[in-house]
Image: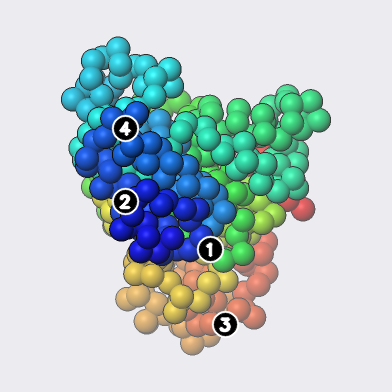
């Protein structure tokens, strides 16, 4: 297509290269600015370009563009807009309702107004609702869907009776569509293996959102509540017998929902901070490692994200706590690690502790008593800080967590 596309709109061809794609997008933007009548030559060119762009994206990109209506709803949620706030862009209250319910399609005027006013890319808004959706569902790995069914994600429905596509549609429609989830995933911070199945990641996150919705919580989170004192008091709960449950209750009092959901076989997550609803941030934990030190470090790490990155514009932080080299971390992850480490074992205490030189159980126990935390947490930090993973194995590995959440289906 190349220069022919830019110089002669009458010779629009199939998009074959990334350069063709970029030029097509530029031309779409120019046509939208012209605001052509849909039945005019330019209007027909715009429709044709939209089809060609969608065709190229379906071939070139594994993730489809969001559904236009879901993209609008997601933007409304981000900006805390009500349907009435869309009237200046769409028209009357009844027309807004028709658009959001899918009963009426967006006009070129609406596309231009929403693109200019709300910052939603025109290439998303000109996409026909639900187009290629079934193809996207069909691309999901059958083994992943089977695992979702085995874990009860679809309730009483089954692949045999309903089919894969119908199951996935229903699963995502109750909380957020795959398009919304894709939008959130694209605004995420990944600290996880490049081998992670993104479909499995979206299924896990959606399941966590569903679980969080079922939690009865009246308290709204107030940004600024979490400080050093808050975290220090929280981590001291680790010394108590049922500390995982106490942590869940403690966070709930401050408007934070802690959800436990095992990881998928194609994900390597320890936890995530989900800031989709800032009134009630969500921490999701997988308990991939059935160890108390990992449980507490991950909670503190995710809380650090809420503290430091609440207004960063990122909706989700996915974290693989173990197995990631420090050199591979971005600044946000390094900040979260540093805060979590200092809460469990303050640097000043570590510098003068005998445990720094002699990583014995006696030294770990003494330091844990001084700090008022469980010995497993201190043992975990001694192993990490000194890179001495051959020590204190018994203390770390005997402190289990999953038994506090017997209703979950744990991977064996």
Vertically, is 313 above or below 34?
A: below
Mark 3, residues whose alpha carbon is within 10 Å: few (<14), some, or many (≥20)? few
| Residue at the disc numbered 2 | 27
Counting residues from the start of the chain, the first of labels 4 and 1 encountered is 4
Counting residues from the start of the chain, the first of labels 3 and 2 encountered is 2
Counting residues from the start of the chain, the first of labels 2 and 4 encountered is 2
Circle 2: element type: helix
Q: Tags 2 and 4 in contact by the CB under 8 Å rule? A: no
- Front-most of residues 365 and 226: 226
Circle 4: element type: loop
| Residue at the disc numbered 1 | 192
Circle 3: element type: loop
Q: Nearer the viewer, mark 3 or mark 4?
A: 4
Residue 62 point in image, percent of width and height: 56, 54
Q: CA distance from mark 1 to mark 2?
A: 37 Å
| Residue at the disc numbered 4 | 40
| Residue at the disc numbered 3 | 388
249 left or right, relative to 90:
right
């Amino acid at each position: 297509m190349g220069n022919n596309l830019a110089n002669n709109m009458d010779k629009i061809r199939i998009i074959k290269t990334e350069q063709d794609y970029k030029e097509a997008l530029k031309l779409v933007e120019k046509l939208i600015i012209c605001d052509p009548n849909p039945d005019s030559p330019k209007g027909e060119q715009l429709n044709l370009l939209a089809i060609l762009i969608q065709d190229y994206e379906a071939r070139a990109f594994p993730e489809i563009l969001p559904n236009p209506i879901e993209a609008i709803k997601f933007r409304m949620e981000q900006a805390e807009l009500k349907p009435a706030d869309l009237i200046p862009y769409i028209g009357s209250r009844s027309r807004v309702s028709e658009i959001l319910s899918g009963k009426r399609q967006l006009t070129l005027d609406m596309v231009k107004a929403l693109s200019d006013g709300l910052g939603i890319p025109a290439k998303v808004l000109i996409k026909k609702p639900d187009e290629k959706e079934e193809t996207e569902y069909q691309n999901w790995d059958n083994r992943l869907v089977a695992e979702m069914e085995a874990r009860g994600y679809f309730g009483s429905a089954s692949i045999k009776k309903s089919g894969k596509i119908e199951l996935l549609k229903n699963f995502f429609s109750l909380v957020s569509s795959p398009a919304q989830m894709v939008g959130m995933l694209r605004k995420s911070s990944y600290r996880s293996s490049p081998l992670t199945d993104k479909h499995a990641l979206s299924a896990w996150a959606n399941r966590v959102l569903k679980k969080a919705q079922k939690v009865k919580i009246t308290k709204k989170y107030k940004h600024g509540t979490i400080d050093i004192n808050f975290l220090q008091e929280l981590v001291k709960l680790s010394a108590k017998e049922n500390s995982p449950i106490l942590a869940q209750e403690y966070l709930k009092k401050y408007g934070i929902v802690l959800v436990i959901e095992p990881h998928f076989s194609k994900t390597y997550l320890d936890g995530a901070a989900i800031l989709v609803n800032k009134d009630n941030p969500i921490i999701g934990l997988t308990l991939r490692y059935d160890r108390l030190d990992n449980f507490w470090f991950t909670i503190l790490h995710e809380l650090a994200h809420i503290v430091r990155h609440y207004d960063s514009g990122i909706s989700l932080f996915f974290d693989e706590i173990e197995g990631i080299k420090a050199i591979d971390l971005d600044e946000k992850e390094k900040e979260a690690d540093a805060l979590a480490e200092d809460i469990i074992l303050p640097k000043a205490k570590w510098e003068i502790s005998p445990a720094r030189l002699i990583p014995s159980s006696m030294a770990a126990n003494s330091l844990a008593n001084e700090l008022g935390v469980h010995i497993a947490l201190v043992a975990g930090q001694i192993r990490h800080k000194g890179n001495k993973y051959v020590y204190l194995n018994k203390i770390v590995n005997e402190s289990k967590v999953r038994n506090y959440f017997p209703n979950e289906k744990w991977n064996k």
